[in-house]
Amino acid sequence: MAIFFLQITSVQRSAGRRATASAAYRAGERIRDERSGEVHNHSRRRDILHTEIFLPAQFDGQPVGWARQRERLWNSAEHAEKRYNARVAREYQVTLPAELSGRQRVALARDFAREISERYKVAVDLAVHEPRPNGDPRHFHAHLLTTTREITPTGLGAKAGLDMQAVERRRRGLPDHSREFVNVRERWAILANEALRAANLSERIDHRSLAAQGIDREPLPRIPLKHLKMEQRGLRSELAERLRADYRERVQRRLERVASAALTTAAPAREREPAPAAATSADIGEVRRQAREAWLALRSQQIAGGAPAREAAPPAPRNTRERDASQSEAQPPEDLSL
């Protein structure tokens, strides 16, 4: 079953991260950081399926070789930032549908990288990874490492995309950061569903929350990869245990709410249904009229058929003996043949 996963993070110096190190790890290459002199060598990785650098279409055929070389590009991104806590890169990580073929997954990732580059006028360093040998065999994913500044013929320009200041976004008439996050998520879902439809597959993904989709269940907890690996090594992770405990508590509260709602729905019908309205005088008059017409019709049939006139009632017995005798004569004999 195809799942939706898109994570947008930033590479910040304040967290001890470097754009050169991130690019080397994701692309499986050897890159030297010019600011620190450190060499990041991940050339032994064997799970890299595809790497490619995308630039805005306006630079097609232009001499911007520095932006097409991975080491020069990310060293330029490091040199462009002067602050100790600067954001030197931004990453978009997506899960590629395992239902697609390898070529279709790469094509989908390339389409998304091209759109991000055109949308924000930045460089996008794409790396498509296959699942690790001891991991989930469906975990095909792609890393899109982008510059935080626009690409220009002479180097990196002003901040762009999600790294643009809120004041500048308002001045340009762009949506705020929260809305832009949603727009990117929605666009990825559209591209993935188009790829699934083109492959004649029925699976679809949805960028919306479970509540927005009308699905009444608690979302599964997301446990950081670091803590999952700790548990895989047999170590105890308090954070993972707390996240699972919180999830179980939320599920229990939801079940209690559902049970309470069911009890309210199952209340006695007489307490919920309105009492029947009293018969009106018009209804009573109608019943009486119908009964009188039925009696007159029956009387007419009896007269037309020559029914004998009603016999006069015998005189009342004068004492108890005569009354008992009259009652015994009036009762028919028992039919013993039954």
Image: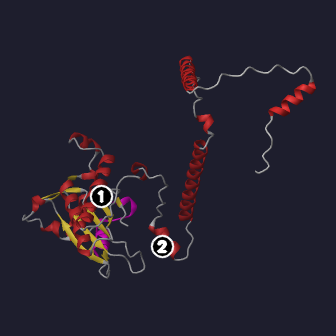
Reply above or below: 113 against 49. above
Q: Is residue 209 left or right of residue 53?
A: right
Task: Give the overall secondary structure of the magenta segment.
Answer: helix
Q: Earlier in the sequence, mark 1 or mark 2?
A: 1
Reply above or below: 32 against 257. below
Q: Residue at x 80, y 41 (%)?
A: 333
Q: Residue at x 44, y 53 (%)?
A: 215
Q: Give the residue number, with chain letter if any, for mark 2.
A: 229
Stretch in magenta: 9-28
Which labelled disc corresponds to residue 189?
A: 1
Q: Is residue 113 left or right of residue 325?
A: left
Q: Position of residue 39 (x, y in %)?
A: 30, 75
Is 196 within the magenta?
no
Rounded to the nearest whole Å, what is the CA distance between mark 1 and mark 2? 29 Å
- Quarter assignment of residue 206: bottom left
- Quarter assignment of residue 65: bottom left
Q: Check disc 2 and report its element: helix, strand or loop.
A: helix
Q: Position of residue 42 (x, y in %)?
A: 32, 78
**Can residue 307 be seen?**
yes
Amino acid type, residue under disc 1 in the picture: Ala
Q: Residue at x 18, y 65 (%)?
A: 54
Is 25 within the magenta?
yes
**Can residue 74 be seen?**
no
The nearer-to-camera label among 1 and 2 is: 1
Q: Position of residue 92 (x, y in %)?
A: 31, 61
| In contact (CB < 8 Å): disc 1 and disc 2 | no
